[in-house]
Image (spheres, helix red, strand yellow):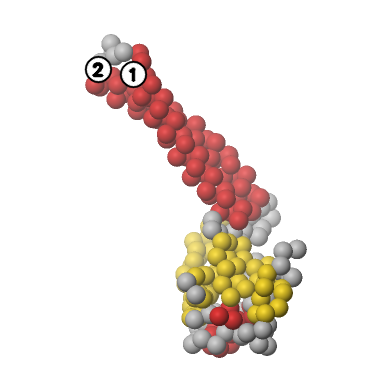
Amino acid sequence: MRTRPAYSLCNPHRVQTATWRFPLAVGFERSRTSRIVTLSILGVLATGAAGCFGYIVGLFAMWATAGRDADPSALSVSFVLAAMLALVAAVGAGLAIAFVSRAGAWLEGTFLTVRNLTTRTVNLALARSVTLRAISDTQAAVPSDGGVVLTGVAVRTPLLTVVAGGTTVRLRLRSRDGTLLPPAQMLVLADALAVARCPAAAEAVAWLRTMAADPRTLLL
């Protein structure tokens, strides 16, 4: 397993080696496979549709400027436009699939990593700023068949923001499926954050432990 130098929870200036990774359930935990399959199918359809649309638009543009007696070589414009729009659709679908596949977070000692399309890591022992607030999300339900249904119900999602050095990490304490972070994981996160000595860190730790004991509080 990959190792990363981490700061001791007892002494943030003493370097030790962290050889464990503790995953946090903040990604698409239950619906990842179904979402990837759905996005793949929609991506193929969107790519084909975008290509056809671009080709038709290119034909109309050619006929509008040169009439039906236009040089056949001008058809290359339609093919280029079709290829460009198909590429845009394919890239968009690829980014959506990558986001679903990669979304997640984990702890390695005092290092917190959050991964979406990009990956950011901060050392909680060196945090300059810590804030914990609630944001509004739309609840998603995941039936037994693995599908995803938006219920339209707004829920409060705790958002932890940590600034260390020149890096800012934002961690949603609710999975992308709508499930609040399990109490055991909140307690591990609180213990890791307890080494921070910046303003509001102690308050965030207290809130994490309170929510682990009673999720109904949710920063209210």
Q: How many marks?
A: 2
Along the line of sight, the residue nearer the viewer: 125 or 104 = 125
Along the line of sight, the residue nearer the viewer: 102 or 3 = 3
88 to the left or right of 17: left
Q: What is the number of the mark on residue 74?
A: 1
Dot 2 or dot 1, earlier in sequence: 2
Q: Quadrant of residue 126?
A: bottom right
Given the image, on which type of amino acid does mark 1 rest? Answer: Ala
Q: Residue at x 31, y 13 (%)?
A: 71
Along the line of sight, the residue nearer the viewer: 208 or 71 = 71
Q: On the image, numbered disc 2 is attached to which residue? A: 66
In this rendering, the answer to whether 83 lies above or below 122 is above
Picture coordinates of residue 214 (x, y %)? 63, 83
Q: Residues within 10 Å of mark 1 (few under 14, many from 20)?
A: some
Contact between marks 2 and 1 (CB within 8 A): the answer is: yes
Q: Residues within 10 Å of mark 2 (few under 14, many from 20)?
A: few
- Considering every residue shown, the one lying at the far top of the view is 69
| Element type at mark 1 | helix
Picture coordinates of residue 48 (x, y %)? 50, 31
Position of the N terminus by quadrant: bottom right
Q: Is residue 72 visible?
A: yes
Which dot, 2 or 1, sits closer to the camera?
1
Picture coordinates of residue 106 (x, y %)? 65, 68
Q: Is residue 177 visible?
A: no
Given the image, on which type of amino acid does mark 2 rest? Answer: Ala
Q: Residue at x 69, y 55 (%)?
A: 144
In this rendering, the answer to whether 67 lies above or below 185 is above
Q: Quadrant of residue 5?
A: bottom right
